[in-house]
Every structure is written in structure tokens, then in C-alpha cells.
């Protein structure tokens, strides 16, 4: 008989092997720079949908969010509500228009290049500043995934944090370096399916072990009177509850500015396929978020009844899977946790690479580098960002959810208003976009330091949007080329051309 640990190791080895194989197959299909960065705009809707969801949710879905629910109760579930609404609106409002507009506007293959082309910014300031924002916030974001990898190995195997963090980083780096965007997207599909299955199986088995939903709900309430309250009644003042609810819903605003998510929209085969991708992606997200929230709540009841509560709340799903499931099945659940971590990390590394190569080096390089040189530089960019993020992850000073929240706010405030206005308002100017990006980014840092209790994304997004509009109205000059392109992109998004 194979021991429990061997079952677990076998499951993880199989998972790692499949990821590397997919990366290698994607490598064989990647022959040019656009293919490495955007898969040649050839993603089917189901790949784009599952890839966007998996790259979005990261390790915080199986670790961070259940941990927050386990610690504070259902009121933290407003994060899930905000994310579900935001994801739906992102697919509805941004996906078809961005897919159409990026192709119409000089075939832009990155978000910074789209901003520059859409607004005819000849100064290159907008593209350069966008790239800097991407590198700063994504380095922090990638670091959160590496922290999650280290915590995972500590909890799952009682192993060394640093060893686990480096192993997760190395495997992710391997398939991302060679497979590029296509490799990241295809591995995301497998990882997304693994995540959703884990978040259905673990809470369902835990409820059966406790004795049914009625007993589970009773234990959750017994531990804390407000654990099942969406308003925090019983353990939180009304004022504090309002801040938590607003902060949770504000997470949805972040979607409009996340480069690693909306790049999937740009890679769709056609703008019209965004509709079927939206249905698939939103359904996946609903099930996954519901499972994560349920896991946190059920964890309260489970450890109240059976003891051995986790020392780190963010490992609640890991511990329940190890206790409740056959070692082989638990191994695949653990692999799903790794999938959540690695899917986002790989996407972040690709976007950082595109910022370094496409939006910095290529923008200023004369003559234009060959495709072979660009691919080599793209892989070098992935490696450099991974090394810096790993250095930050060696001694983490925040929770996984805390690291993700800050980076999410940074992108949402810096890019979200510009994306929406670029697609739906003809009069946005490069000066308005520049001013909005600066105001959004700076406000995130300042508001975070003020520690008001209100998630920094909300005020930063509002101020950035207002700044974009005011400055654009002051600096607007009619440009016939921009007007014609805007109309053409709008018609393409609606399938009229």
C-alpha cells in the first residue's frame, strides 16, 4: 500500500508534469513575438473565459478569501459579491470593445501600447508610465503568489517556507518562459477546472462530516453571533460594517484595469465571442466564489467541533482536505491550490515581460529588433521580474489577501477609468489619461497609509475618473483620425463590420 504522503506526492508530481508538458507544447506553437505575448489573437471563448478566471483568482481564492471568512464571518463575503458583479460587467462592457479597438488601433498587443495608439500620444509618456505602473504593482502581486506557495508547503507538508516558495516559482517560471501567453492560457484552463472542483468537494465533504447543514449553521452561529450576518450584526458596529461592505463591493471596480485579465479579451478570436466567454466565465466565477465563501464558514464549524484549528486562517481549506479526503484526492486538492497560485503568477510574469520588451525596449529601439530577439528578451523579462518578486517574498510582511488587495487597487485605479473612457468616450485625451493614472496610483498609496478602514480602490478610482474627465475637457482637440477609428471600433464590437 502506498503511504499517505506518497499518494500526495504522486498527485503533485503528476500535476507538475502536466503543466510542464503543456508549456512545452505551447512552446512548439510559438514562433513570433505576437504569438508569445498574445497567442496570435486565436483564443477560443472557453479558453479565454477559464483562463481569465484562473489568472484572476490566484492563491487568495482558496487561501486568502476562505481565511478572511473564517476569521471575520460572512460580512467578508461582500468581496465575492463585488467581484462577481465586476467580472460580469468587465466581460459585458470591456471585452468586445477592447478586442475590437486594440486591433483597429494599429494592432495594439498590450494595454500600454493601446493607450498610446488610441490617444495618439507621440510623447511616449503614457506608454512609459503605464509600463512602470505594471512593473511596480505586478512585482508586488507576483510576490503574493510566491508567498502563497511558501505557506502552502508549510501547511501541507510541514516543510520549509523558502523551499516551497522557490519550488512553486521555479515550475511556474519554466512553463511560462517557454510557453509564453499560450502556455499560460492553456495551463490556466486545467488549473481553473481543478480549482472549481476543489472548492465544491472540500466544503461538501466537510458538511457531511459535521452532520449536515443544520448542525453546521448552528455551530457557526454558536462560535460567533455575527458569523452568518451579511451586516456584521453581533460583532461589529454599524459604521465599521458599512466600511467593510463598501470596501468589499469596491473590489469589483478593480476588474476594468487588470492587465493580466483584460489581455485575454484582446486575445479572443472575434469581438462577438465575448458573449459566450462571458457566460462561461461568470458561471465559473459564481461557483468558485461560492465555494470559497462556504469553505471559510464551514471551516468555523468543522474546527469548532473537531478541534485542531489552523494556526494560520488562510490554510483552512488545506487542513480540511488533508483530514477529510483520501490522500490521493487530497493531493489533487493541494494541486488545485497550487493551480490557483501558479495560474495568476504565470499571467503576471507574461504581462511584466510585455511591459519591459514591447512597451519599453521595443518602443525606443532603433532599428526594430527581429522576432527572435524579441522572444529572447521576453523570456529574459519574465526571469528578471520573477527574481525580484521572489526576493520580496523571502520575508513577507503581509497576508496573501493584503498583498493582493493593494496590487488590485493599484491597477484598478490607475488603469480602470482610462480603459472605460477610452472605449466609451471620444474626448479622452492623452493628458487626461496621464493625469488620471498618476492621481489613481498616488491615491492608492496615500489612502493605504492613512488606514481609514475604507478600501483604497474606491476613493482612488473615483478621483482618477474625475481627473481624467476634467483634464480631458481642458485639453481636448478634435482629431479626425481618432474620431474615425473610434466609430470603426464601435461598429466592429457590435459586429457591424
Image (cartoon, rainbow, N blue to C red):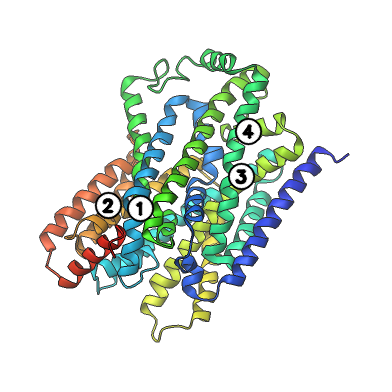
Give the quadrant of residue 316.
top right
- CA gap between label 3 and label 1 equals 26 Å
Q: Which numbered tag is attached to residue 417?
A: 2
Q: Secondary structure at mark 2?
A: helix
Mark 1 lies on a secondary structure that is: helix
The label number, if any, that marks residue 231 in the structure image: none
Earlier sequence position, callout 1 versus callout 2: 1
Residue for badge 4? 201
Query: Which x, y percent locates residue 281?
Result: 46, 46
Query: How many circles with numbers are drawn on the protein?
Result: 4
Label 3: few (<14), some (14–19) or many (≥20) C-alpha neighbours in 10 Å: many
Residue found at x 57% / y 40%: 196
Residue that mark 3 sits on: 194
Distance from disc 1 to disc 2, alpha carbons, whole Å, reads 8 Å
Label 1: which residue?
257
- Few, some or many residues within 10 Å of mark 2 (<14, 14–19, 20+): many
Q: Residues within 10 Å of mark 1 (few under 14, many from 20)?
A: many
Quadrant in which the N terminus appears = top right
Q: Residue at 37% of width from left, 76% of height from top?
A: 363
| C-beta proximity under 8 Å, tags 1 and 2 | yes
Provide residue 144's location: percent of width, then percent of height. 52, 48
Q: Residue at x 66, y 42 (%)?
A: 334
433 vs 265, nearest the viewer: 265
Q: Residues within 10 Å of mark 4 (few under 14, many from 20)?
A: some
As measured in the structure, the alpha-carbon distance from the residue carrying label 2 to the one carrying label 3 is 33 Å
Mark 3 or mark 2, which is nearer the start of the sequence? 3
Q: Is residue 154 visible?
A: no
Q: In whole angstroms, how far apart are the C-alphas of marks 3 and 4?
A: 11 Å
Q: Nearer the viewer, mark 2 or mark 3?
A: 3
Amino acid at each position: 500500500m502506498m503511504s499517505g504522503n506518497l499518494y500526495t506526492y504522486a498527485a503533485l508530481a503528476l500535476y507538475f508534469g502536466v503543466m510542464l508538458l503543456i508549456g512545452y507544447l505551447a512552446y512548439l506553437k510559438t514562433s513570433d513575438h505576437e504569438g508569445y505575448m498574445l497567442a496570435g489573437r486565436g483564443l477560443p471563448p472557453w479558453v479565454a473565459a477559464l483562463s481569465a478566471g484562473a489568472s484572476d483568482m490566484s492563491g487568495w481564492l482558496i487561501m486568502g478569501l476562505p481565511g478572511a471568512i473564517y476569521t471575520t464571518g460572512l460580512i467578508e463575503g461582500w468581496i465575492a459579491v463585488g467581484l462577481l458583479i465586476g467580472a460580469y460587467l468587465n466581460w459585458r462592457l470591456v471585452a468586445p470593445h477592447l478586442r475590437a479597438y486594440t486591433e483597429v488601433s494599429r494592432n495594439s498587443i498590450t494595454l500600454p501600447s493601446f493607450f498610446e495608439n488610441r490617444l495618439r500620444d507621440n510623447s511616449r509618456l503614457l506608454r512609459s508610465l503605464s509600463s512602470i505602473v505594471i512593473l511596480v504593482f505586478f512585482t508586488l502581486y507576483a510576490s503574493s503568489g510566491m508567498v502563497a506557495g511558501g505557506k502552502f508547503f508549510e501547511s501541507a507538508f510541514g516543510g520549509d517556507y523558502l523551499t516551497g516558495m522557490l519550488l512553486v516559482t521555479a515550475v511556474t517560471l519554466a512553463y511560462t518562459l517557454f510557453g509564453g501567453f499560450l502556455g499560460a492560457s492553456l495551463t490556466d484552463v486545467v488549473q481553473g477546472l481543478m480549482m472549481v472542483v476543489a472548492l465544491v468537494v472540500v466544503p461538501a465533504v466537510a458538511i457531511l462530516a459535521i452532520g449536515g447543514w443544520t448542525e453546521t449553521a448552528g455551530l457557526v452561529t454558536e462560535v460567533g453571533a455575527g458569523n452568518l450576518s451579511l451586516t456584521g450584526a453581533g460583532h461589529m458596529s454599524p459604521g465599521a460594517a458599512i466600511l467593510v461592505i463598501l470596501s468589499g463591493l469596491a473590489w469589483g471596480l478593480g476588474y476594468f484595469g487588470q492587465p493580466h485579465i483584460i489581455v485575454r479579451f484582446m486575445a479572443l478570436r472575434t469581438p462577438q465571442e465575448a458573449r459566450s466567454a462571458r457566460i462561461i466565465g461568470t458561471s465559473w466565477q459564481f461557483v468558485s466564489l461560492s465555494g470559497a465563501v462556504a469553505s471559510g464558514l464551514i471551516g468555523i464549524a468543522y474546527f469548532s467541533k473537531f478541534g485542531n484549528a489552523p494556526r494560520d486562517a488562510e490554510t483552512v481549506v488545506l487542513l480540511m482536505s488533508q483530514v477529510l479526503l483520501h490522500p490521493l484526492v487530497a493531493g489533487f486538492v493541494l494541486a488545485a491550490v497550487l493551480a490557483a497560485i501558479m495560474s495568476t503568477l504565470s499571467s503576471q510574469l507574461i504581462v511584466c515581460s510585455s511591459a519591459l520588451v514591447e512597451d519599453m525596449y521595443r518602443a525606443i529601439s532603433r532599428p526594430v529588433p527581429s522576432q527572435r530577439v524579441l522572444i529572447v528578451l521576453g523570456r529574459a523579462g519574465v526571469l528578471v521580474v520573477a527574481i525580484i518578486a521572489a526576493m520580496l517574498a523571502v520575508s513577507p510582511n503581509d497576508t496573501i489577501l493584503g498583498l493582493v488587495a493593494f496590487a488590485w487597487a493599484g491597477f484598478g485605479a490607475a488603469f480602470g477609468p482610462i480603459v472605460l473612457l477610452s472605449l466609451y468616450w471620444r474626448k479622452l485625451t492623452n493628458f487626461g489619461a496621464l493625469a488620471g493614472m498618476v492621481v489613481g496610483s498616488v491615491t492608492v498609496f496615500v489612502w493605504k497609509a492613512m488606514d481609514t478602514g475604507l478600501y483604497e480602490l474606491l476613493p482612488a478610482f473615483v478621483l482618477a475618473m474625475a481627473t481624467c474627465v476634467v483634464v480631458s475637457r481642458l485639453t481636448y482637440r478634435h482629431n479626425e483620425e481618432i474620431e474615425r477609428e473610434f466609430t470603426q471600433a464601435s461598429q466592429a464590437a457590435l459586429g457591424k463590420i
